[in-house]
Image (cartoon, rainbow, N blue to C red):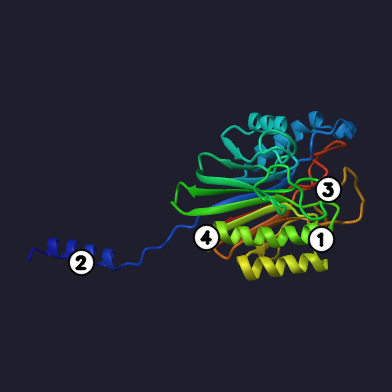
């Protein structure tokens, strides 16, 4: 047999038996309570914060952002400042445009939407505007099933904002959300973002972390990150500096992901805060 032919056959055989090495794909996930447009916020009114938010988003370019407290016109403003993104979610008051949203923004060049939904944290989860347990306002969870275009892999994202007044409401919300995530996402890759209004290291936080891990395989991204960047002592600022640290915003991920970096971004321009919460992000790969 011709030596050149033998060599070519050997190369082909080696190629066929070589293991296929999967490519790692990196994503930047963000959770951000943007603060509703409150005219009583003085120099921190939404109008004055828009340039700060826009500059931050242009710098960070997150792949997925779970936001809280957005009003409908704020979502429109965010789409204007974030070209190339889309979002899912509706207002909590009526399931349309009324009241605060918990929208999930995603990059259209990175993801293809498969399906999405929303449920209310109450005894009537499909009733818009329903209020659960001892909460005083409607509380919601927005979710989306995404397909990663480069890899074809699929993942689920859940985003929420728990009650600010009741431990019972937060406990029931956590339990119900856990059940719904299991039903909707199963054993697939899951990312969770939100303002949980539960202080880290509190008994209720430990209960939530245990429940999410046992029933949903979810871990706090900050706890498993290879690098903890600056910030992180507090995610809430109340438009003030020097307040008692309060970590109440979290990103949870399933073990499908490796967390390379976690950070709480303390962003101000002069005396204008980006929000009354600091945005937090995690760089993950799968």
Q: Position of residue 216 (x, y in %)?
A: 61, 65
Q: Nearer the viewer, mark 3 or mark 2?
A: 3
Q: Residues within 10 Å of mark 3 (few under 14, many from 20)?
A: few
Compute the Cα span from label 2 to label 4.
40 Å
Q: Nearer the viewer, mark 1 or mark 2?
A: 1
Q: Residues within 10 Å of mark 1 (few under 14, many from 20)?
A: some
Q: Residues within 10 Å of mark 4 (few under 14, many from 20)?
A: some
Residue 120 seen anywhere in this rendered image of the structure: yes
Whichever of labels 4 and 3 marks the residue nearer the N terminus, that label is 3
Front-lying residue, 41 or 114: 114
Compute the Cα span from label 4 to label 3.
33 Å
Front-lying residue, 202 or 18: 202
Q: Position of residue 229 (x, y in %)?
A: 73, 57
Whichever of labels 1 and 2 marks the residue nearer the N terminus, that label is 2
Q: Secondary structure at mark 1?
A: helix
Which residue carries the number 2 mark?
A: 10
Whichever of labels 3 and 2 marks the residue nearer the N terminus, that label is 2
Q: Position of residue 278 (x, y in %)?
A: 78, 47
Give the answer, above or below, for where 223 lies relative to 47.
below
Which residue carries the number 1 mark?
A: 168
Which circle marks residue 188 in the picture?
A: 4
Q: Position of residue 199 (x, y in %)?
A: 82, 60
Q: Are marks 3 and 2 in contact (CB under 8 Å)?
A: no
């Amino acid at each position: 047999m011709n030596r050149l032919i033998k060599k070519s056959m050997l190369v082909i055989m080696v190629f066929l038996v070589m293991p296929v090495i999967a490519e790692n794909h990196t994503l930047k996930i963000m959770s951000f309570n943007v603060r509703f447009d409150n005219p009583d916020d003085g120099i921190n009114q939404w109008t004055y914060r828009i340039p700060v938010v826009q500059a931050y988003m242009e710098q960070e370019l997150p792949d997925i952002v779970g936001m809280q407290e957005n009003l409908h016109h704020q979502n429109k403003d965010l789409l204007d400042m974030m070209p190339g993104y889309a979002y899912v979610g509706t207002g909590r008051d009526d399931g349309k445009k009324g009241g605060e949203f918990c929208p999930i923004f995603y990059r259209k060049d990175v993801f293809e939407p498969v399906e999405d939904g929303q449920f209310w944290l109450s005894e009537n989860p499909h009733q818009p505007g329903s209020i659960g347990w001892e909460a005083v306002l409607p509380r919601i969870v927005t979710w989306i099933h995404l397909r990663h275009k480069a890899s074809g892999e699929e993942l689920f994202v859940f985003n929420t904002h728990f009650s600010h007044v009741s431990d019972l409401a937060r406990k029931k919300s956590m339990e119900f959300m856990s059940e719904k995530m299991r039903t909707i996402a199963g054993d697939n890759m899951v990312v969770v973002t939100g303002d949980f209004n539960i202080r880290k290291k509190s008994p209720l936080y430990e209960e939530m972390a245990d429940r999410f891990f046992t029933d949903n395989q979810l871990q706090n991204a900050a706890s498993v990150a290879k690098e903890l960047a600056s910030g992180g002592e507090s995610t809430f600022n109340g438009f003030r500096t020097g307040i008692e640290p309060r970590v109440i915003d979290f990103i949870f991920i399933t073990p499908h992901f490796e967390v390379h970096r976690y950070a709480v971004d303390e962003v101000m321009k002069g005396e204008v805060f980006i929000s009354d919460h600091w945005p937090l992000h995690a760089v993950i790969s799968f």
